[in-house]
Amino acid sequence: MEKWLNFLTFDLVGDLAFGESFGCLAEKKYHPWVRHIFKSIKDIAYMTNFGRIPWLAKILKLFTPKSVSNKWAEHKEISSEKVRKRLAMEYDRPDFVDSMVKKTKSAGSTITLDELASNAQLIVLAGSETTATLLSAATFYLTTHPDILAQLNDEVRSAFTTEDEIDMISVQKLPYMLAILNESLRMFPPVVNGVPRLIGSGGDIILGQYIPEGTTVDIWHWAVYHNPDHFAQPNEFIPERWLGDARFQNDAKRALQPFSIGPRDCIGKNLANAEMRLILARLAWNFDMRLAEDSFDWEKKSESYFLWQKGPIHVYLTPRV
């Protein structure tokens, strides 16, 4: 199931970023560009963390195999070629490349091919893998909690008379489904670690501890969301906590910030929310779901390296009669 969700989200965001789908759904396999991302999850984590310590970053660069560097160069070239093809289109198309080019021109500036390709790469990664991870987690929690899944099915199937009615506007009126997605984000945040911030001039005091200027700090999402000081029964999947249940009246619900917060929060959060709501609603509308026995330990087997390295989650999908 997690593979098909990745196929779907990478195809969707690839189309918006590069002007064409990666073809994962049609080919039933990962495009080389996408496959490289999954093979590099650990590398990205190591490079990101070692990069915070300059002398370690230099050592890592010295010992990085040439094959790894070549793969990243190939990955970048594929991105550049896709952007070239998109720019060669002779008609307007409301996508990310079009928006970046027009916004830059309106500001009286220019944007290079490398800048377009780098931005497109980031947009695809941020807008696809994370959404697929959240939907994989939601699928796991729903199929391991049949009573919650039954309530979701009832809400979706009673709210619409045809599948065509399920759109970006109508899915916002499904409170139980929105609570399920919030709880999935809390239990299994797609980005586990925090977003680094630099302490400004003069330093700062955090929780009574003086932190000197120039220090990199962050707060890990997973740690915050599973802290009993913030959430009652933090390791239990209970969507009702987002629906006014008295048991959770003291939960620090504002602590849930999976897209970060402030002027540097995730620019793709609205797209991600639209994707996950539409996909989950259509799954519930079209299929009855049941988890295969070999996937009951999926959560425990998943490993985090900045992004999650997820194993397969096998689900029986039975079309509605």
Image (cartoon, rainbow, N blue to C red):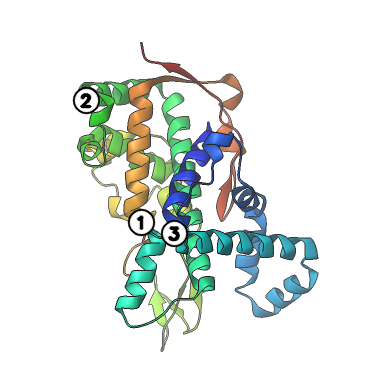
Q: Which residue is mark 1?
A: 93
Relative to 70, residue 202 above or below = below
In the drawing, what numbered circle is on residue 104?
none
Local secondary structure at mark 2: loop
> Which residue is located at x 26 percent, y 29 percent?
164
> Which residue is located at x 40 percent, y 45 percent?
185
- Taking the view exactly as shown, the residue that stands out farthest to the top is 321
Label 2 crowding class (10 Å Cα cut-off): few <14, some 14-19, many 20+? some
Relative to 112, residue 20 above or below = above
> Which residue is located at x 58 percent, y 35 percent?
27
203 sits to left or right of 52: left
Between the C-alphas of marks 1 and 2, the distance is 31 Å
Between the C-alphas of marks 3 and 1, the distance is 9 Å
Local secondary structure at mark 1: loop
Q: Are marks 3 and 1 in contact (CB under 8 Å)?
A: yes
- Which callout, 1 or 2, points at the residue further toward the start of the chain? 1
In the drawing, what numbered circle is on residue 89?
3
Residue type highlighted by circle 3:
Met
Residue 121 visible? no
- Which callout, 3 or 2, points at the residue further toward the start of the chain? 3
Q: Which residue is mark 2?
A: 160
